[in-house]
Image (tube, rainbow, N blue to C red):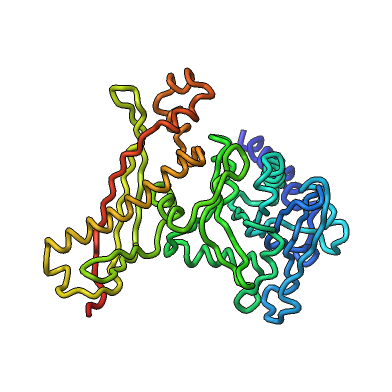
Amino acid sequence: MKMRYKFFKLFALYLLIPVILTACYDKIELEDRALVISMGIDRQDDEFLLSMEIPKELESKDEDNAENLKLAASSSVSSAMREIDSYSGPKLYYGHTKVCIIGNDVIKDPKLFKETIDALERNREISRKLIIMCSDSYANEIYSAKTDNNIPTGIFINDFYKNNIKSLSITFRQDLEGVIKQLLESSNTVLPIIKNEDEKLKISSIAVLKNYELEGFLNEEQSRGFLYLGNYPAGGEITIPFEDTNTALKITKKTSHIKLDKNDLGNYILNCTVDIEGNIEEYTLSENVFLNSDKYKILQDEYAENIKKEAQSAFELIQKKYKADVLGFGEMLRKNYYKDYLYMQEDTQKAFEQAKLDLDVKVKIKSAGSSR
């Protein structure tokens, strides 16, 4: 028995050797690849216009060599990708693609937007963590903006989110995975907007898409209010008037939770709790707020009321004007009130438009800056 067992072990090892030593038949060396760092997708003359950012030398600081933008137009996003690949020496590789910017003409058309997301999803090299943004004009125009040290636009945007996302109050990071999830749940989604202002990149405010097409934009204040409600990081500063001066609170932590309830009258209530922690960076007060418990509480309540107003205003705009369920109402209805969900079928949109928001905001000031 021992001899037979030893024989089988040797035989199994013998069978594994070819598998271990076999190389990939279609392997392409890194130096033979063209790394696509970012891409812009526009619609021009009834065709998709793709802008592929393929840096020649990522470490180059020379303006002429910092990036290489390749363009191609075709009837579909996938065919435009293949066309760029056909006249590019090295084979295009999307494994390191950081950002996709979608132009205004594409997000205005539900068919074009669906085709774009479908092409990105089907490309096996593209990560589900790909940052998705939109432009209020042409995506191609974003690439004419200047960046620090002339680094590629895609790397600049990726670093921007990596270093600043927790300190921002009016924008957020949306990725391909998040867009697909939201579209599958409700056919609605939100996208951060990137602009080229005086040849400088500006990431601010939010675009609202309903049924796969652009429904409208949120301004900076409305975007901040929306981010308080959603499960997104929210940072930045809140400035309010207090004792004849302006007092700024730097947000250090934000948590929010939305729960769907139903009252005795059959009305749906979105119970939302928002907890904010922050520091007063600098203020001008006649007395240190931490030495006066009444003043301390009043200031916290004033900040909470300011946040509540902004969040309520954003909700009313999304619910009443855009009528776009971008807070996951339909999915909460399906999970918590499944019989109602089945009964309503296509009327979940109407239920969202009639739902009430019960908003509870709490602010805690952790420390104060210099007083004057």
* Residue at (31% x, 43% y) in the render: 359
Left/right placement of residue 5 relative to residue 322 reads: right
Figure quadrant of the C terminus: bottom left
115 to the left or right of 232: right
Looking at the image, residue 105 lies above or below residue 155: above
Picture layout, residue 103 above or below residue 348:
below
* Foreground of the two, 81 or 102: 102
Question: Could you tell me which residue is drawn at 59 percent across and 42 percent down?
Answer: 180
State how many labels appear. Answer: 0
Tell me residue 130's x, y (percent).
61, 54
Q: Residue 167's x, y, as percent?
A: 42, 65
Q: Tell me where residue 325 appears, x and y as whole percent.
A: 49, 38
Q: In the image as oriented, which residue stretches furthest toward the right?
A: 87
Q: Position of residue 350 (x, y in %)?
A: 47, 28
Q: Is residue 297 above or below residue 117?
A: below
User: What's the residue at 26%, 71% (across, down)?
Assistant: 245
Q: Is residue 332 visible?
A: yes
Quarter-wise, where is residue 29 in the image? bottom right
Residue at (57, 44) in percent of width and height: 215
Q: Quadrant of the N terminus?
A: top right
Residue 63 or 211: which is nearer the viewer? 211
On the picture, is 305 further left or further right than 63? Answer: left
Q: Is residue 178 visible?
A: no
